[in-house]
Image (tube, rainbow, N blue to C red):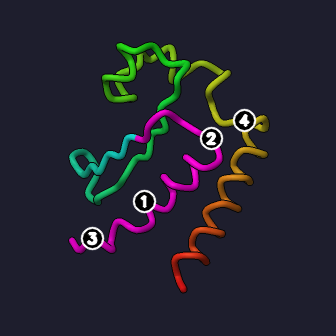
Amino acid sequence: MEPEDLTDMRLLGEAIALVTQPVRMNYSILGNTDNYLHAHVYPRYAWETSDRLRKPAWLYPDEFWQNPEYLLNESHIELAEKIQAKLEELRRLYSR
């Protein structure tokens, strides 16, 4: 795998960071249960407890992942549009 193969993941992380201002960004590249390589980009925020920030995001309990407040819904449309616009801006900037 060449470093440029990770460009899309890096640009997505940068777009999310510019829009949401996390304290850090976690990247995970996996391929252990699926027959293809895939990546996760997890922004991490100051509102998370310090013990949670030191652990991978997927170690949050199931109740967190099933909480309607955090599930994708109409309240996230504006945020998704902002991230998409920033991602397109970064792609144009870096493709020059």
Q: Which mark is residue 36?
A: none
Disc 2 crowd rating (10 Å Cα; few below 14, some 14-19, many 20+) is some
Local SS, label 1: helix
Label 3 vs label 4, nearer the camera: 3
Local SS, label 4: loop
The answer to whether the residue labelled 3 contacts the one labelled 2, judged by CB atoms less than 8 Å apart, is: no
Q: Which mark is residue 73?
A: 4
* Relative to 69, residue 34 above or below: below
Local SS, label 3: helix
Which residue is painted at 40% across and 15% down in the image? Answer: 50
Q: Is residue 38 left or right of residue 2?
A: right
**Disc 1 residue type (three-letter):** Met
> Which residue was labeled with disc 3?
3
Disc 1 crowd rating (10 Å Cα; few below 14, some 14-19, many 20+) is some
> Which residue was labeled with disc 2?
20
Residue 80, position in %: x, y?
69, 49
> Which residue was labeled with disc 1?
9
Mark 3–mark 4 Cα distance, whole angstroms, equals: 34 Å
In the image, 93 versus 59, the foreground residue is: 93
**Magenta span includes 8:** yes
The answer to whether the residue labelled 4 contacts the one labelled 1, judged by CB atoms less than 8 Å apart, is: no
**Disc 2 residue type (three-letter):** Thr
The answer to whether the residue labelled 3 contacts the one labelled 4, judged by CB atoms less than 8 Å apart, is: no
Which residue is painted at 26% across and 57% down in the image? Answer: 35
Mark 4–mark 1 Cα distance, whole angstroms, equals: 23 Å
Q: Earlier in the sequence, mark 3 or mark 2?
A: 3
Q: Is residue 58 left or right of residue 18?
A: left
